[in-house]
Image: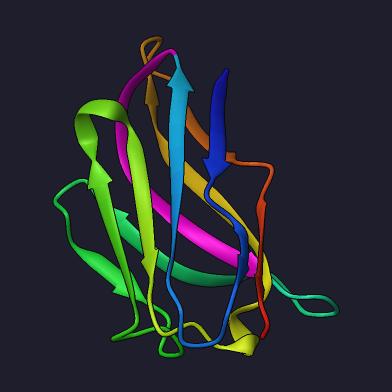
């Protein structure tokens, strides 16, 4: 009922920048929070950053000061600006979103993921 579509992944050199975007669509009434998670090969999925409806944000310690999450609420879109990327940032990045549908049901959805590779 809710689709999350990520874009913006790819190959970037260490120290470079990349911007990820995720758009939510469907019978959405309110999006309470949107965020980014990542999963590296052989590792568990981990939180990168999340932003609430009041624009408050939380970050993993490993990305604080380098990544910035933001929302375009009118478009149900969340962005992740990644600066000073390092090889350890290589992972599949997943968008997440939760909120309420027009039917008043709650939703919690994931995108399919976008690959980010940091290599020289």
Image coloring type: rainbow
The one of 2 and 69 positioned closer to us in this rendering: 69
Tally the numbered discs.
0
Identify whether 89 is placed above or below 53: below
The one of 2 and 75 positioned closer to us in this rendering: 75
Q: Residue 19 appears in which quarter of the rendering?
A: bottom left
Identify whether 69 is placed above or below 110: below
Judge left or right: residue 41 versus residue 111.
Answer: right
Judge left or right: residue 54 versus residue 80.
Answer: left
Of all residues, the one furthest to the left in this rendering is 54
The one of 95 and 119 positioned closer to us in this rendering: 119
Question: Bounds of the magenta span?
Answer: 27-38
Task: Residue at 44%, 33% (x, y): give it.
Answer: 23
Residue 64 horizontal/vertical position (percent): 33, 85
Task: Residue at 20%, 27% (x, y): give it.
Answer: 74
Quadrant in which the C terminus appears:
bottom right
Quadrant in which the N terminus appears:
top right
Residue 115 horizontal/vertical position (percent): 69, 59
Residue 65 horizontal/vertical position (percent): 28, 86
């Amino acid at each position: 009922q809710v689709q999350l579509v990520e874009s913006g992944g790819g190959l970037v050199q260490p120290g470079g920048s990349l911007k990820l975007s995720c758009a939510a669509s469907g019978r959405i009434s309110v999006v309470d929070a949107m965020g980014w998670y990542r999963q590296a090969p052989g590792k568990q999925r981990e939180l990168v950053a999340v932003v609430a409806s009041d624009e408050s944000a939380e970050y993993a310690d490993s990305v604080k000061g380098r990544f910035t999450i933001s929302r375009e609420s009118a478009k149900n879109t969340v962005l992740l600006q990644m600066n000073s990327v390092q090889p350890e940032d290589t992972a599949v990045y997943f968008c997440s979103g939760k909120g309420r549908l027009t039917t008043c049901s709650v939703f919690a959805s994931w995108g399919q993921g976008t690959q980010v590779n940091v290599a020289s």
